[in-house]
Amino acid sequence: MNGIPATMRALRQPATTGPRDMHLITDAPVPAPGPGEVLIRVSAAGVNFADVMRAHGTYVDGPRVPYIAGFEAAGEVVARGQGVALEVGRHVIGAGAGAFAEYAVLPAAGAVPVPAGWTEEQAVGLVLNWATALAALGPMGRVAAGETVLIHAAAGGVGQAAVRLARHRGATVIAAASPGKHDVVRDLGADHVIDARGCDVASEVLGLTGGQGADLVLESVGGEAFRAGLAAVRRITGRMVVYGMAGGEAVISNRDLNFTHPVQVIGLHIGVLADAEPQLFAELVDELSTLVTAGVLPPGRPTVYDLADGPRALVALEARATVGKLALRP
């Protein structure tokens, strides 16, 4: 590949011992794009909680160690594989293995153009965080104007997007976040902010909704937050969209759904959605583009770390010590 080096800097995960053991290497082979793929020179890589899970070996069908970490990247297309119409020189964002590096391969079909006037860093999160929030509120959660939405982890990457989008759709937003992050979600337009850790979330939501519960709950935490979300959903017509498990696994039985929590529980993984329903994913991307043009979706403002500091960023994310989207700069 003309002008493209044979090796690159990258973050390598050597074992399933967590992100503390992730480390920078300088001799990783630059990958070559296969059929239907593009190679990008990475300008910014998105950091996601799934990266933490992969580092611990708990992510379903995650990569086998050792591996080059990361899976969300934005940058310039520098080479393309067979059958790809996307031009060299285009600036795109997408998901593909080995994103925490100077070069990464992305499926061309899922590579979305960086919006005009945006930098790659500002676009990080567009096809994962924003698309997840849009799917959760739209085709999955079916939120309507006048309904009430409870958003767990409201100060995170998906959470902040969901607050903005729910308000745009005319919903009343109850944002759950730790106390140090309350001002962030208030500034995004949340109508009510509750302490995600220090209060009875279900009781708070029931009190704010006249005992009815939230019409829609967006749940990404798992563990006890999952149970609290179930108890906070309006019976029969209420929905809970589950798109994460940062706090651990949680279970619900048919007995629960029949007697205790007769609500609609909906699973969402944006990667699975894109693979199983590509037309729906394309519609989400089109809607995101419309929201960008209308100014509803502003350029992102991620906290940016140098590539070598990626392990530190992941450790902070795991400790719930971060706010909003994180990105790495190679």
Image (cartoon, rainbow, N blue to C red):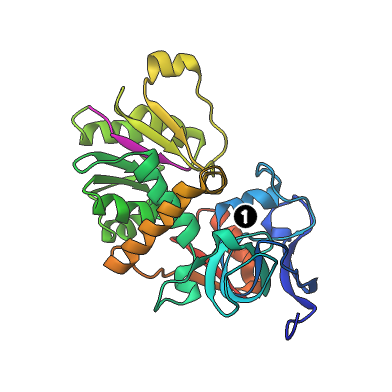
* Nearest to the observer: residue 196 or residue 35: 35
- Residue at 53%, 26% (x, y): give it: 251
Point 69% across, 68% down: residue:
81
184 lies above or below 225? below
Q: Position of residue 90 (x, y in %)?
A: 54, 76
Residue 322 appears left or right of 20: left
**Callout 1 amino acid:** Asp
Are there few (<14), some (14-19), or many (20+) residues within 10 Å of tag 1? many
Q: Which residue is drawn at 30% across and 59% down?
A: 183
Q: Does the segment drawn in magenta span residue 214?
A: yes
Report the side of 176 relative to 63 (left or right): left
Whether 125 is among the magenta residues is: no
Quarter of the figure that contains the N terminus: bottom right
**Nearer the observer, 61 or 276:** 276
Q: What's the magenta region?
A: 212-220
Which residue is drawn at the image coordinates 33% and 60% (left, top)?
Answer: 184
Assign a secondary structure to mark 1.
helix
Residue 150, image x and y in percent? 32, 41
